[in-house]
Structures are given as structure tokens and as C-alpha cells.
Amino acid sequence: MSKKELLPIEITHHVRDHCLCMHLQRAARAMARHFDDALRPVGLTSGQFSLLMSLNRPHPPTLGAVAQLLAMDRTTLTANLKPLQRRGLVDVTVDAEDKRSRRLWLTEDGRTLLRQAFPIWQSAHKSAEEIIGVGDAEALRRSLVALS
């Protein structure tokens, strides 16, 4: 490849310094590592915690509803459910009213684990907000909700 075909390094630096997508991806990975490290003692990742928490409802949600809430496609959600099912934390059943639909149930073991994990999450969340700054964290939350 000749030098004429390369983009000028200034463009690379501009994207590095201004690309919202790249900065969000980097921040998301850093935040996930922060929560993964905190939740490791209870054997959960940050994604698994979020998934289990999304099932903590009075009535079991459909797979589609959880996929929408977590902004995942159904195939990815199904793959993420498998290890939680193997651990006995989640049950997946056919919906009694719509045989094409699946309901996701948080088992008693799943509820117990969430009760253990929640104080850990609270502490990790508090430390993340302190790093960001509480007021800035609220503004960031609003911006992220607007983006999604």
C-alpha cells in the first residue's frame, strides 16, 4: 500500500479523540471489568447480574421482553441464559397462554444469589459513582438512557 492510500494520521487522532462510539465502548469495558471484579466472589459477571436482576419480578417475563430490556437479540440472550440454567439459577418454560413464547423464571437459588450479590453491586456502584462524581453520574445516566 502506498503512502498516498493511507489516511493522514491527523484523521486517526481526530477519531481517537472525538469518536463517541469508541469512548462508550472503552468506558463500557472498563465499567464491566469493575463490576466483574466486584461480583467474582459470588461467581457472577456484571452481565449475569443484570440478567438475573431483570428476572426479579412478580411475574416471569417473556424471553422477548427481557431481550428488549437488555438490548440483546434473542439468540444472544438464550446463549447467556445457558450457564445460569446449568447453575439452577434460572428456569425457562413454555408460556401457558402462547406456546411459541418462553417465560424466564428466577429460581429460589437465583433469588438467594441475587440477595448475596446486591450489597456487592451497591458497593461497586457507589465507588463507580464516586469516580465519576455523583452529579456527573446522574447526567451520564440520563445521556445513556437518551442514547438507548
Image (tube, helix red, strand yellow):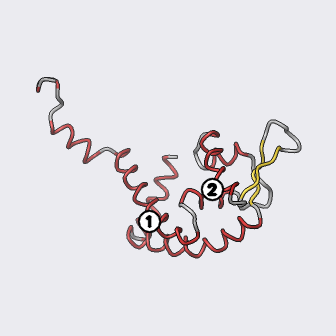
Say which of 11 and 96 sits in front: 96
Q: Residue at x 15, y 38 (%)?
A: 9
Picture mark count: 2
Picture coordinates of residue 96 (x, y %)? 88, 44
Say which of 128 and 137 sits in front: 128
As drawn, 137 above or below 130:
above
Say which of 110 and 68 sits in front: 110
Q: Residue at x 44, y 70 (%)?
A: 129
Picture coordinates of residue 55 (x, y %)? 70, 57
Residue tagged 2: 51
Residue at the far right: name it: 96
Q: Residue at x 44, y 73 (%)?
A: 127
Say which of 79 and 53 sits in front: 79
As drawn, 142 above or below 96:
below
Does residue 87 appear left or right of residue 143 in this picture?
right
Gap between marks 1 and 2 measured at Cα: 17 Å
What's the mark number on residue 46? Answer: none
Does residue 51 appear left or right of residue 108 in this picture?
left
The image quadrant that residue 99 belongs to is: top right
Q: Return the disc, 1 or 2, that comes first in the chain's sequence.
A: 1
Residue tagged 1: 34
Q: Looking at the picture, which amino acid does disc 1 mark?
A: His
Q: Looking at the picture, which amino acid does disc 2 mark?
A: Leu
The image quadrant that residue 51 belongs to is: bottom right
